[in-house]
Amino acid sequence: MAKQGGTSGKPKGHKVALVRMDATFFFERAVRSLDRHDLPRALKYFRKVVEYEPANPVNHCNLAGVLSELGDYQASNEVLERVLLELDPKMYECYFYMANNFANLGLYDLAQEYASRYLEVDPEGEFAEEAEEMLDILMTEFGTRMVRRRRDGRIRFRGEEDVARRFLEDGRFLDAAAHLEAKVKELPEATVERNNLSLAYYYLGDIRRAIDMAGEVLNLQPGNLHAVCNLAIYHRAAGNEDECRPLLDQLRPLRPIQPDQAYKLGTTMGLLGEHRTAYEIFSHLVKHLPRAEAPVVHALAAAAANLGRLRKAAHLWEEVHALDPSSGIGRYYGAVLRDAVGRGMTALPVSYQYVLPYADTTRLQRVEGGVENSAVGRELWPPESVVRSSLMWVLRHGDPVTKKQVIPLVVSFGGEDVERALRFLLLDDDEYVLVKQAALKGMFELQPEEIVEIGLPSRILPVDFRPESAKRLAGRPEWQRIVELAVQELQRRGENTLAKVAMEIWSEFTQLIHLQAPRVRKPELWAGALECAARHRCHLPFSRKEVAERYRVSQQGLGDRLWLIIETCMLTD
């Protein structure tokens, strides 16, 4: 041992080399540890690298790579997701890394989804060849067409910011509310998320909360057009005409320059019965867009039809069909219009939204002498109707997006042919996931008497959709205990909307699984899996390790049950 001397305490005759402890220092040691296959030490050093340079996304990716090598795939994906959401959304290779992690977790649909996302956003990327190979292997082994749906370009990838919008468009309002409530907590100043959350509350029937949330937006950003439009709709729905009238007066003279704001204002005015104003807005928008867009032309046609300009509407829906023939929307409304003219109708009240009408919104009103008489789709379109026949044709031969839109409408018609068509879709191994999800929802509404077989990636699942059959399983004490544990935990954490999503998933799962119900030995395992499934459905990040610790169960057992719920309820979207 060197002796100390002098007041400095340093050995005489020697110079001290100071080691600079920075990111480069720990990175070099992490690489050396990897060369020696010492993964735990490499993990330790890469964590230090991230501490010193937290804004460098490459450091986080290196950390995620070591976590993956150690088998902690969930933690690896959480790091990669943070890179995309917070550091560098254009670091597209993260999608490929996440695909590998999901494959190792046995979540093959998600592996396909993320490999497809990588190829879509970076088709010539460094890992494009490996991603293609992964997709081919997964396709061969598991046969789902979700991959083909992504790769053939019929549906574009939507980023994280569009998750809530997709939920709203799909009618999954509880999921949208749960997702957006979490986002609003993270982003106190966010107006877009608050506007969408107010819509979710409105669609759930909670108009009071919808009004309050729209008010919060206007407090943050006075004059926000989307909030004013929403607020006018909410007050009209609540019967608050004194509050609605000044908002209409405020909106009526506006002519926004931005196309998205003009579209929002036009649809709002149409929904509130201001069809002449809507017609003016959409006429101006159609003229000034760089190129014609089918949703805008459809909205102009809807305004014309509501005003009684049926010839103009017919011409516009022909244009819609020419612009977007695969959607079937122009063809559908053209047939509706011809039937209405044949019935002597002078005006045709139709929706401004660019979708084929769902069961609860498919409603034509015969206008005679100022009196409106409503008739729902089932009464208006008998089995021999040309519209019904064309919709059934779409179920057999249409593209997946149109099939998904058509299913709720044909379910409202009912009939053996509809049930047979849905049975075929559910059993077909090559059918797209989004179509099967819609067909599954349709079966819940139809409640057929006979057993229905559903083709899942790993098995054929027999299901009895009769309401009384589900009670046999859901009524068992151990199965009741599962949902009670999950709901209590979520409510304890203040996540009440997520608790409702969990109850909704559990109701579906018990009905779907009861003919092949697994034995429940530890309700806590299933409760933790149910919470994870609810977060997964709402696209909310979660740590399987953290959830397992809260429920005092193993990660492996929780993961096995989570996958069973995800696969059975088709939560992979």
Image (cartoon, grey):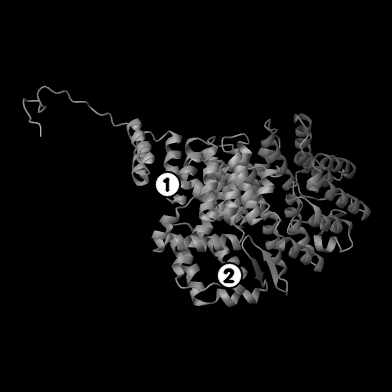
Query: Where is 348 relative to 266, above or below?
Result: below
Amino acid marked by disc 1: Leu
Residue that mark 2 sits on: 510
Q: Is residue 549 left or right of residue 133?
A: left
Within 10 Å of disc 2 (Cα), the crowding (few <14, some 14-19, many 20+) is: many
Q: Position of residue 354 (x, y in %)?
A: 74, 46
Q: What residue is at 65 percent from the left and 46 percent from the top?
A: 232
Q: Nearer the viewer, residue 301 or 471?
A: 471
Query: Where is 44 relative to 28, above or below?
Result: below
Q: Position of residue 270 (x, y in %)?
A: 74, 45
Q: Nearer the viewer, residue 358 or 38?
A: 38
Q: Nearer the viewer, residue 474 or 373?
A: 474
Q: What residue is at 86 percent from the left and 52 percent from the top?
A: 336
Amino acid marked by disc 2: Thr
Q: Is residue 144 left or right of residue 33?
A: right
Q: Position of residue 10 (x, y in %)?
A: 11, 27
Q: Is residue 306 left or right of residue 176?
A: right
Q: Is residue 279 left or right of residue 309?
A: left
Mark 2 and mark 1: span between their CA atoms? 35 Å
Within 10 Å of disc 1 (Cα), the crowding (few <14, some 14-19, many 20+) is: many
What SS does tag 1 mark? helix
Q: Which label number is shown at residue 67?
A: 1
Q: Which residue in the rendered view is the most extreme toward the front?
A: 36
